[in-house]
Image: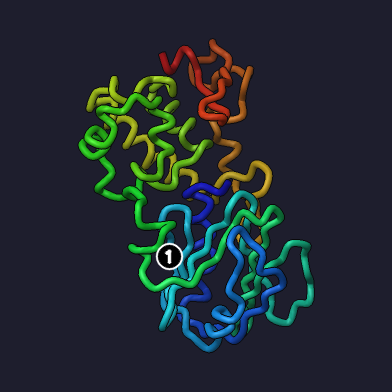
């Protein structure tokens, strides 16, 4: 699933559509995770896109009268194509057509979704989300008070979108390696100093991944068709039984937490 860096990369790549009017919308298949209201989407025609921004792992198009909320799901991507192009890829579900180009939503597994909303703070997908990890609000004091009584492993807590948004399986492993914290540590055993390392590492790793264009493992591509290149910088994720890049002694260990693969170094994250 695309995490914060992949979604942010997508948002940055489609800024050309901000300030433009939607000429038309073509719906090839409305059957996403939640079925699209085709009639409601047809009424977005001629509205101007005022801004395009990200909240957690969601993309929001603020229009003159409505907001379009997009979630990429497990395999969703956005692709920019020329307006005149007739090229069709399997699983191209929705096309937003503008003056010169069009923005196409492709999702093979159809776990993604698209909604027309009025107030992001009240929508069921957004209203209970935690703080943004790149914001000033995400610091050791905030994290300490959120999880100081939690029995959950720190990796699980870091992926809890009610605590902090946008961090998924890949970046949680990378962040905890950078912070020198073992992912199995119970959250309530961490000190404020260790919390500070986690919040600092979160900002560092996420910014680095955004700069690299996100991580391409299987499904993620940027809207221009390029792959994300942070994969070459991954320190632990998907590197089971390979030598640790840092200590050069231990091999990376793979365990399963909450049905998700976790990777860490027993030497560096003692």
44 to 60, vertically: above or below = below
Left/right placement of residue 26 relative to residue 176 reads right
Q: Quadrant of residue 192?
A: top left
Identify which residue is drawn at 61% across, 77% down: 38
Front position in the image: 61 or 205: 61
Q: Secondary structure at mark 1?
A: strand
| Residue 270 drawn at (x, y percent) | 41, 13
184 to 5, vertically: above or below = above
Identify which residue is drawn at 34% across, 42% down: 163
Identify which residue is drawn at 45% across, 66% down: 60
Left/right placement of residue 221 relative to residue 147 reads right
Front position in the image: 250 or 75: 75
| Residue 181 drawn at (x, y percent) | 38, 22
| Residue 197 drawn at (x, y percent) | 31, 30
Label 1 CA crowd tier, 10 Å (few <14, some 14–19, many 20+): some
* Image color mode: rainbow
239 to 60, vertically: above or below = above
Question: Disc 1 marks which residue?
Answer: 53
Identify which residue is drawn at 41% across, 59% down: 124
Left/right placement of residue 25 relative to residue 162 reads right
């Amino acid at each position: 699933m695309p995490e914060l860096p992949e979604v942010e990369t997508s948002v940055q790549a489609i800024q050309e559509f901000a300030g433009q009017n939607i000429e038309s919308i073509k719906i090839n298949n409305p059957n996403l995770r939640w079925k699209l209201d085709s009639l409601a989407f047809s009424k977005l025609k001629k509205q101007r896109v005022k801004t395009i921004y990200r909240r957690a792992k969601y993309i929001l198009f603020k229009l003159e009268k409505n907001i379009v909320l997009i979630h990429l799901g497990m395999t969703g991507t956005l692709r920019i194509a020329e307006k005149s192009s007739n090229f069709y890829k399997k699983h191209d579900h929705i096309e937003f057509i503008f003056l010169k180009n069009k923005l196409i939503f492709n999702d093979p597994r159809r776990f993604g979704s698209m909604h027309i909303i009025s107030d992001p703070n009240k929508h069921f997908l957004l209203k209970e989300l935690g703080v943004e990890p790149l914001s000033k609000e995400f610091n050791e004091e905030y994290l300490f008070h959120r999880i100081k009584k939690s029995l959950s492993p720190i990796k699980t807590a870091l992926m809890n979108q009610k605590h902090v948004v946008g961090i998924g399986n890949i970046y949680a492993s990378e962040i905890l390696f950078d912070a020198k914290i073992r992912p199995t540590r119970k959250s309530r055993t961490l000190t404020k100093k260790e919390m500070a390392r986690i919040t600092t590492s979160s900002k560092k790793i996420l910014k680095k991944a955004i700069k690299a264009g996100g991580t391409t493992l299987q499904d993620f591509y940027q809207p221009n068709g390029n792959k994300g290149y942070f994969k070459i910088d991954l320190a632990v994720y998907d590197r089971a039984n390979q030598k640790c890049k840092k200590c050069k002694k231990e091999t990376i260990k793979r365990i399963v937490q909450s049905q998700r693969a976790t990777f860490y170094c027993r030497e560096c994250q003692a």
